[in-house]
Structures are given as C-alpha cells and as structure tokens.
Amino acid sequence: MQNIDSKNKYTGINTATRLAGLLGHPVGHSVSPYLQNALAEKYGINMAYLGFDIAEGQLENAVKGGLAMNAIGFNVTVPYKKDVMKLLAGVDPAAEKIGAVNTLKLEPDGYHGYNTDMPGFGRALDYAGISVKDRNVVMIGAGGAANAVLCALLEKGAKNVLLLNRTVEKAEALAERFRNYYPDSRIFTSPLTETEISTGTGASDEQASGIEPYIRTMDSISPDKWLAIQCTSVGMSPKTGAAPIECRDFYEKIDAAFDIIFNPEETLFLRKAKDAGAVTSNGLGMLLFQGIRSFEIWNDIEVDDNFVEELLSGMRDAIHK
Ligand code: ATR
C-alpha cells in the first residue's frame, strides 16, 4: 500500500476520471480521501475522491455543483447528514428510517441518498466476530451516530436493546422511533447519571460502584451477558482519560464491547471492558466498511475482504500521520 503522500501524487487522472468527494465541515482530518482513492486503485476504477470543506449555507450550491459536473457521488458528513436529505431526488428507505444520509449517488434524475453507516457498522461487527442475533445489547449514547447503530442492531436481530444516555429524553425519542419499525424487538431506556462521567480524576470508587439505575434495569431485563456499544464522543482524542461509564458492575455484565471511536485505538471504555474479560473492537472497522459500502454503491460492485487489513493499516497511518 502506498502511503498517503505518494497517493496524492496520483497521475492517472484523465478526462474520463469520475469525481467523487466528501462534503462536510470541517473535513481536514478525514481519512476518506485515502480510503476511497486506495479502493479505486485496488479495483481499477477511474475515480478521484477529494475532500470539500463546505461553508455554512453552501450545501445546496455544492450539491448543484456536483450535478453540473456529473460527479459520481459524495459522502456527506457532519454537520450535513440531515440537511442534505431535502436536496435529493430520492432517499433510500433505510436512510429515511435512520434520518440521515451519508452517501449520494448520481442517478439520471439527480442524487439519491443512502446511509452506509448502518451496513458499515454491521459489517464491522461481523468482521470482528461479534454476533448480535438474539443477544442483549446495551448502547451508550443517543446522538447522530446512535441512529445508524441502533438500526443495524435491530436489523441483525438483537433480542433486547437498552439505550443509555445522559439526556434520557433523547434515548426515549430514539427508542420510540425505532419501536414503530421493529415492534417485535424490546427497546428500553435508562439515564446515565453524572457520577459515571469520569474525566480520569472525577468519580470516586464509592460513587462508581454504587448500584446505578441502569444496572438494575439490565438485571431486570436479562441475567445473560451483554454486548456493549459505545456511541458517545467521551474518550475521544485528545480527552482520552474519560469513559462514559465507570461502574465496575457494568463491565462485569458484558462479554463484548464495540466503541465507535477509532482515535485512540483503545479508549478507556474498551480498556475497562477488556480488563473485565470482554472481546473488544474499535470504530476503525465501521469507518472502513461504511466507506466500502459507499464505494460499492457508486460503482455497482462488491468489495470482498481481501484488502481489509491493508486498508485498515493505511487508515491508521493516515490518522496518525
Ligand atoms: P454524534 O453524531 O457523534 O453521535 P452527537 O449527535 O452530538 O454526536 O451525540 C453525542 C452523544 O454523546 C450524545 O449521546 C451525548 O449525550 P447527550 O444526548 O446527553 O448530549 C453524548 N455525550 C457527549 N458528551 C458526553 C459526556 N460528557 N457525558 C455523557 N455523554 C456525552
């Protein structure tokens, strides 16, 4: 695999090269240009992928510009995943359900929107060997990313899903939306109390080991072990000394943990889970597989797992360069 710098010296661009790119603000730290251009090279696709930092108020112009230039498609990231939906010729039903679009594909009538975070997360779980079917899953966080994660878990047949969030009303709103789509699954909510929010120096052991409401909720739902998915920004670089949950009883209840954060590679949450004996996986796989799914949509191809390790390694280099 070439490193990112040599990739930027790409000379294969010609008049047949199709444009793709990332629309967001900011986009400076994105590894998507590395990933998409590496995929294009691996699969012999004449496509060039750039990052576009779209200023506030310019999203509609950006989408119209893409149309005018016949760009094959775009990824869409923060803060435009919702706003872009009203600018499209069509939205895939799964993306509609999740309420966010992260991939645009050019069709004869304009751009159509898809959500690849959802299948990307599902494929990352598969790749990590973490199964969901008929399992108890506890999710921490109810923000934008949690929507796609919850949808994937329900699609994969999770038996019980417990949503924990600092603002419990957001967890309840998320649960309520998906209960309508998956009436056979049980979705519960519980607040995360302030005592669990550690900055590394905060909660004492006494506070941390008190019986929290969500521990009682977990016990009342099932005595079996849980899969835990961390979907908040707590513990993300540079504030790596924080975990959304300190309570030791929580980590004793889980046997697998997934953190959507990929920098650092091992968050404090994952370290605590691993110390308690859980299988762990970070969010780099989700980032990779959402990108792979977008690439598949644009190019009507299926990407196999042959290059996954190579791409993950290149992404690590791009993130830490
Ligand atoms: P994203 O799109 O990455 O999910 P988001 O929509 O801003 O970002 O959501 C961030 C999530 O992290 C939310 O669940 C948020 O909790 P609240 O809904 O209560 O705000 C959670 N979060 C952020 N900072 C947190 C903190 N210090 N403690 C606990 N949860 C936090």
Image: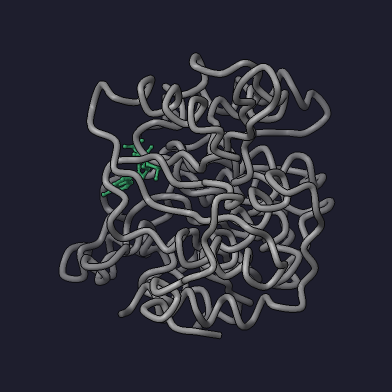
Residue, x 42% and y 22% (percent of image)?
83
Q: Residue furthest front?
A: 15
Where is residue 202 shown, x and y percent of the image?
17, 63
Tell which of 65 and 25 is nearer to you: 65
Where is residue 64 shown, x and y percent of the image?
44, 22
Residue, x 80% and y 54% (percent of image)?
301
Where is residue 199 shown, x and y percent of the image?
20, 64
**Picture quarter containing residue 150?**
top right
270 displayed left or right of 310: left
Where is residue 192 shown, x and y percent of the image?
38, 44
Against 78, is 265 above or below?
below
Report the number of numbered marks.
Answer: 0
Residue, x 56% and y 18% (percent of image)?
88
Classify the position of the C terminus by image quarter: bottom left
Against 94, is 304 above or below?
below
**Picture quarter containing residue 256?**
bottom right
Residue, x 16% and y 70% (percent of image)?
201
Tell which of 233 and 27 is nearer to you: 27
The scheme the figure's colours follow is one colour
Classify the position of the N terminus by image quarter: bottom right
Against 254, is 142 above or below?
above
Q: Quadrant of ligand 1?
A: top left
76 displayed left or right of 29: right
Tell which of 108 and 132 is nearer to you: 108
202 displayed left or right of 101: left
**Residue 9 appears anywhere in the view:** yes
